[in-house]
Image (tube, helix red, strand yellow):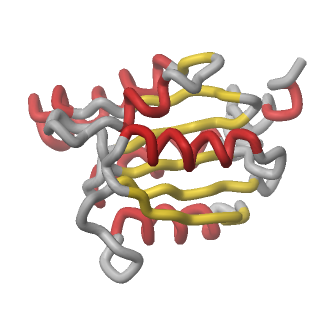
Amino acid sequence: MTALNCTVLTISDTRSLDDDKSGDYLCDAVGKAGHVLTDRAIVKDDIYAIRARVSEWIADPGVQVILTTGGTGFTGRDSTPEAVSVLFDKEIGGFGELFRQISYEEIGASTIQSRAVGGLANATLIFSLPGSSNAVKTGWEKIIRNQLDINFKPCNFAELIPRFLE
């Protein structure tokens, strides 16, 4: 197992550390998987606040993975994909596609309202999940956890991290 340095960002106008179940889940899951949680934050659904926090972590060479929850829907305040995708050096197109495919099995056609995105910026992996606890659990357990596990075969992102800046 290779321990990765991860951060968790909750995007919400209403959540606090006292009631952030999705953020709590991700923090616990990171630790249980043998990774290190280096920071956690909550920001309002504001494109520039989201972008500023994610940019700060992207610039930190000690951060390898950023997990976000919230702000991926279609309301006027949901702007996580717009905030983070402009920061990507490379998009992980398959992440959002696979997330929606798996979610379809769980919630049916409602999955079209998910705008989960993933990408790579300055050798930092970024995965943006919806805010619901069920969606976060699905994204972590069925996709992200395996991709951060160096022993997952046939391939995973964990083994590629040293090569991201080549």
Quarter of the C terminus within the rendering: top right
Give percent across and percent down for residue 112. Answer: 17, 26
Residue at figure coordinates x 38%, y 30% from the top left? 81
Vertical placement of residue 25 versus 44, above or below: below
Closer to us: 75 or 127: 75
Residue 112 vs residue 152: left or right?
left
The image shows residue 36 at horizontal and vertical percentages of: 72, 64
Relative to 92, 12 lies left or right: left
The residue at 30%/68% (across/down) is 15
Based on the displayed image, in which of its 4 quarters is residue 152 positioned? Answer: top right
What residue sits 80% from the left and 34% below the top? Answer: 161
Give x and y (percent) for residue 20.
Answer: 35, 71
Instruction: Establish if 32 lies above or below 66.
Output: below
Whether residue 137 is visible to the viewer of this picture, yes or no, is no
| Residue reaching furthest to the front | 48
Can residue 123 be seen? yes
Q: Quadrant of residue 83?
A: top left
Which residue of the protein is positioned furthest toward the left in this rendering?
109
Percent x, y for residue 69?
39, 51
Task: Pick the residue in front: 22 or 97.
Answer: 22
Q: What residue do we see at 70% from left, 33% from top? A: 157
Residue 79, above or below 39: above
Q: Quadrant of the N terminus?
A: bottom right
Residue 6 falls left or right of residue 28: right
Figure disc tally: 0
